[in-house]
Image (cartoon, rainbow, N blue to C red):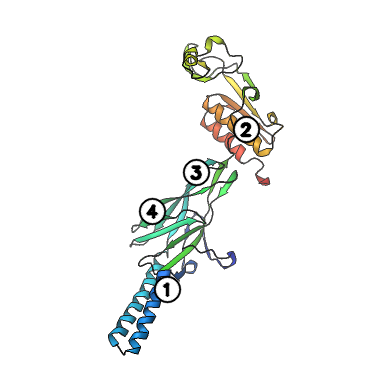
Amino acid sequence: MRLNLPDRFIRRCHSNRLGEATIGRQQIYIIPTRYGFGFALLLMLMWIGSINYANNLGLMLTFLLAGLAVVTMLHTWRNLLGLSFRVSRASQVFKGETACFYLQLINPRSDERPTIGLHFKNGDVIYSDLPPDCDQQVKLCITTERRGRLSIPRVQVFTTYPLGLFYAWSYLDLSGEALVYPAPGPRPQITNLPSYQLNAQGDKGVGADDFVGLRSYRPGDSPRQIDWKAQAREQGLHTKQFGGDRADLCWLEWDHYPHLGIEARLSALCRGVLDAVEQQQAFGLRLPNLTLKPARGETQRQAALRALALFAEAEQ
């Protein structure tokens, strides 16, 4: 059961300074499920039949089951009361991929809380059974449609414990965001590759004879450095790299793609970053509002992708 109320009627749980949101008494909604309505109809028929036939045992059973329903409603409501939530971390993905938010569920009470469900709007439901006095982590995912910062959507937490006669739920507005990089563009043709230049200071190893790996062949590479054995095995044309040689620098520049729009340029630059990292090349990035000095490694990769993700963020 999923209910979507207008925003002006919704009482939401907001994160505090510590990033935690706690469900209070005023933020829980509760209604009967279809089984609850069926149970109420059954009680009504039992009550009418017991009065019609003056059956005291029937009336006693009817009122006993009605009392059970009231106690069930209280337990359903208490199953959510006092639960705390916070976002522990979020994934970093490319546009079009699934971004995941990792939520920490905190049960401060000394009794367990079974069948706690969570989901984003129109998202998959994740269920969790919380033991007493524990923290538990769950993962909620959503498909990304645009690059940049992705704030965690509103979370709906619900339960039908213990008998499924009532549906209690609450809304969470948590603080947390994922970073969505541009979708990588197609691999460029050789004629469309960004400009390369030689760095006079090699830093790929020590000793000119130390083999450090292969990279894709580029026009101008020495024939003596080509891996002809790989070519004979029909594995493509690759160039051998040796430690102590001068390292290639790759500049990824915004102006290199004047015929593309903003998002297409960012996708092409994103592909250039991934290719440079894959080939262990030092690379720099030039954007209209930012220049990253040439470097290599995971730190450079993260800095470049973040710059592309947040480019012209105000215009998103």
Quadrant hosting residue 35: bottom left
User: The residue tagged with tag 1: helix, strand or loop?
Assistant: helix
Relative placement, left or right, of 133 versus 293 is: left
Q: Position of residue 173 (x, y in %)?
A: 53, 58
Residue on which disc 3 sits: 91
CA gap, disc 3 and disc 4: 20 Å
The residue that appears at 43% across and 52% down in the rendered structure is 104
Residue that label 1 marks: 37
Pointer 2 residue: 268
Considering only order in the chain, which callout, 4 or 3, is on the residue closer to the N terminus? 3
Residue 116 position in % (x across, y down):
40, 59
The span from disc 2 to disc 1 (Cα, nearest Å) is: 57 Å
Q: x%, y% of residue 93?
A: 53, 41
Badge 2 vs badge 1, beta-carbon distance below 8 Å: no
* Of marks 2 and 1, the one in the foreground: 1
Of labels 4 and 1, earlier in sequence is: 1
N-terminal of the two: label 3 or label 1? 1
Please name whichever residue, 34 or 99, is drawn nearer the observer in this view of the structure.
34
Sequence-earlier tag: 2 or 3: 3
**Residue name at image x 36 percent, y 74 percent:** 71
Residue picked out by circle 4: 135
* Amino acid identity at mark 2: Ala
- The amino acid on which the numbered mark 3 sits, given as a three-letter code, is Ser
At x 61%, y 24%, the residue is 250
**Towards the viewer: 104 or 100:** 100
Residue at 52 percent across and 27 percent down: it is 278
Q: Amino acid at mark 1?
A: Phe
Q: Nearer the viewer, residue 122 or 180?
A: 122
Sort mark 4 into few (<14), some (14-19) or many (20+) by Cα contacts within 10 Å.
Answer: some
Distance, label 2 to label 3, CA atoms, is 22 Å
Please name the amino acid that badge 4 sits on.
Asp
Q: Are marks 2 and 4 in contact (CB under 8 Å)?
A: no
